[in-house]
Amino acid sequence: MKISNAWRQPGFRLAHAAGAIAGWLLIANAWTQTPPAAAPAAPPSWQQGRSAEQGTSTLHPIAPLLTGRAASELPLDKLKLPPGFKIEVWVDGVPEARSLALGDKGTVFVGNRNLSDVYAIVDRGGKREVKKILKGLNSPNGVAFSKGTLYVAERNRITRYDGIEDRLDNPPEAKVVIDNLDPSQQPGHFWKFLAMGPDGKLYFNIGAPGNIVLPNYTQASINRVDPKTGTMERVAQGVRNSVGFDWNPKTRQLWFTNHGRDWISDDMPNDTLNRVSHKSMNFGYPFCHQGDFLDPEYGKGRSCKEFDAPALKLGPHIAPLGMRFYTGKMFPAEYQGNIFIAMHGSWNRTTKQGYNVMRVVLDDKGGLTMTPFLTGFLTDEKADPPMWGRPVDVMLMRDGALLVSDDYNGIIYRISYKK
Amino acid sequence: MLAAALPCAAVAADATAGMQKAQVCVGCHGPDGVSANPAVPSLAGQPAQFVATQLVMFREGRRKDAQMSPFAANLTNTDLNNIAAYFAAQKLTSAAAPADAANTEAGVRLAQQFNCVQCHGASLMGQQHIPRLAGQQREYLKTQLRGFKAQTRFDMDGQMSSAAQPLSDADIDTLANYLAGIR
């Protein structure tokens, strides 16, 4: 099959075409057992939805330094925090450090997206050892820990490793919690965030299979699976891609970050912070973005009124990832119950923004106010790359300090407070 | 306590240490990474992130090559950063003659038309994880482009496989001649 430049034409949905072809081959192959012919090469998922006029754009996703950088190479003096707070490198040499999870015995587990390993960091009285504990996994972005067990979300499955903190040098075999989460080998947002809910169920995203495409029944959603039964159910839909969530300690409601679509403009649509207050909520993708902005294509003939609105607009192309409610004892009292959000920062914007950790204060009337907390990674909003580090996840330690992962450098920072 | 003070901590990239480690590389890639073998790419003057990323991919078995895979298998991230820093600091002096005027004109046009310059840069010197094409070995460039077109060449995100689809064999020859001859 000859491929043309047709995918550059407005309205052409190559990701759909390629997906349909790949799906058909999968079925045909099951019958005939013959190897499939090569499908035409689709453009990378991040280009999907780009208009013909945007075809010469030089905007591109920012690739991490997969080998990491040493702490001594980083301009740490550029980092800014409110008075009384201090940041230091907690550990370096954790390639593409993304999601964080804390073990019962203090081990910090770290996942990644482009690599295939899970790392464990053991802190022995201030001496930190980085161990590669799991290998050969399929984009193990999601890690969660509960009651002695490490759970890992790969692109296609969630597995458990029981009693792992006592066996870091000889980890147990993976036991499958749920499999077949990616039967179509979807392009686009295949990596998963994972967290243990207060209900004892594991929550995870299944992202949209492209920038702006019609998802199937399981995609563009947040789901939960009971690790005892392996039964999955949908928690929310119309969620383009969420790579961070946590539960409000007061209400026990789920809050999550969500990435808006690309290739509309520098200023639209916003990425969002969202609250799940009841069952069957739909946050609009691909029809309506940020609660009030109809998609130029999929929004035709629809209304945003049929969908649920976000709790807060965070800004366009700011890339919110990990978020945590602050419940520790170390930070000042006014930080109790605040949300920290790691902003990975723009690529699909001519003037870059993000690359920081923001603080969201929830007032008694339900109002939300966002202010910068950790800044200084952004060096030149017009440069390529515009930054020297990219926050991915935030996690509370038992002493109330906040860890921040940086996948660009393979670094984990620690933020502490002293009066 | 800063992790940099710890024994297991990563150390800053060191081009001198990289030169030591790279002695095995220059056997094929040429002195200082300037290749004299048409089938083997020059590494001199490549972006450090590109060299390190490809070595990671060889080491992790994502990109496979009978020659390269065994070399990369036992290198640490610190080794890779050092090797990358060393090659990035070397000057590439292309042995290829510049393409003739007609080929150069056609090559410039094709590099625009097929969006090579969008990612590899206006002067095709590469950036970040994207390789320098200017002055690269001609036969190596042809082999890579044919491989991307046939979807047999390792591709991180599908970008090059997609970009190579509309290239004819003649386009590939014209582009390779032009790119190899850029001084």
Image (spheres, coloured by chain):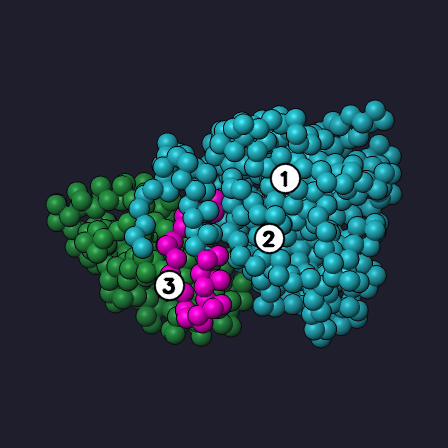
Chain colours: A cyan, B green
Q: On screen, A201 above or below B62?
A: above
Distance from Cα at disc 3 to Cα at disc 1: 34 Å
A252 displayed left or right of B73: right
Q: Judge by depth and name the residue closer to the eye, A224 or A148.
A: A224
Q: Earlier in the sequence, mark 3 or mark 2?
A: 3
- The residue indicated by pointer 1 is A238
Element type where label 2 sits in the image: loop
Q: Earlier in the sequence, mark 1 or mark 2?
A: 2
Q: Quadrant of residue A361?
A: top right
Residue depicted at x 72% and y 51%: A233
Q: Judge by depth and name the residue closer to the eye, B145 or A13.
A: A13
Q: Which mark is residue A410?
A: none
Distance from Cα at disc 1 to Cα at disc 2: 17 Å
Toward the front, the furthest residue is A31
Is the same chain shared between marks 1 and 2? yes
Is the same chain shared between marks 3 and 1? yes
* Amino acid type for the residue under numbered disc 2: Trp
- The residue indicated by pointer 2 is A191
Q: Give the magenta part as a residue range.
A: A23-47
* Amino acid type for the residue under numbered disc 1: Gly
